[in-house]
Amino acid sequence: MPSFDIVSEVDLQEVDNAVNQTVKEITTRYDFKGSKSTLTREDAVITILADDAYKLEQVTEVLKGKMVRRSVDPHFLDFGTVEPASGAMVRQNVTVKQGIESEFAKKIVKTIKNAKLKVQAAIQGDQVRVTGKKRDDLQEAIALLKSQSFEQPLQFNNFRD
């Protein structure tokens, strides 16, 4: 039976490149001259440290722009709360979302079932496997999910016939 997987993955190397480009731009921009603003990435968490809320906002805008240029959807970024840091600075942790959480996976399965397509969707860890008897049914399911607006970007891979 034909099947495909619905996943939500981001290339962490591209995220790293976007972070490095953001750091490079911050060090050369005139409005950041004399600023102690920094940007670091540890695994799936990006930490932004800035002098004040305005500069923090500027750094996040630059980061989003660099992510888009590197073909990384900014919806993968989950911005945490702004918290005060030492030395009258502010800090914000940005989490890079990887995988599909169970609540979001249930929402995807429910969307597919409500469309009454001739496919079955099953949650498998951090991905959703969709199977059907015909390739056309699977392509309808992909078109349905692409037409929906979800809070997290989806990729369709492992299409087997």
Image: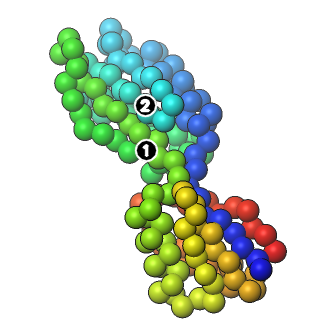
Q: Which of pointers 2 and 1 lies earlier in the amino acid sequence?
A: 2
| Secondary structure under the numbered disc 1 in the rendered image | strand
Instruction: Decide which of 86, 2 is in the foreground and name it.
Output: 2
Q: Quadrant of the C terminus?
A: bottom right
The residue at 55%/58% (across/down) is 125
Q: Quadrant of residue 77?
A: top left
Query: Where does residue 45 sit, x and y in percent of width and height?
Result: 43, 33
Query: Where does residue 5 sit, x and y in percent of width and height?
Result: 65, 65
Q: How is the image coloured?
A: rainbow
Query: Where does residue 91 sit, x and y in percent of width and height?
Result: 28, 26
Query: Where does residue 117 sit, x and y in percent of width and height?
Result: 59, 88
Q: Would you name the residue on which mark 1 appears?
A: 77
| Secondary structure under the numbered disc 2 in the rendered image | strand
Q: Quadrant of residue 155?
A: bottom right
Whether residue 159 sits left or right of residue 125 in the image: it is right
Above or below for 31 versus 150:
above
The label shown at residue 46 is 2
The residue at 43%/31% (across/down) is 46
Above or below for 32 versus 47:
above
Above or below for 155 versus 23:
below
Q: The disc labelled 1 sits on which kind of residue?
A: Leu
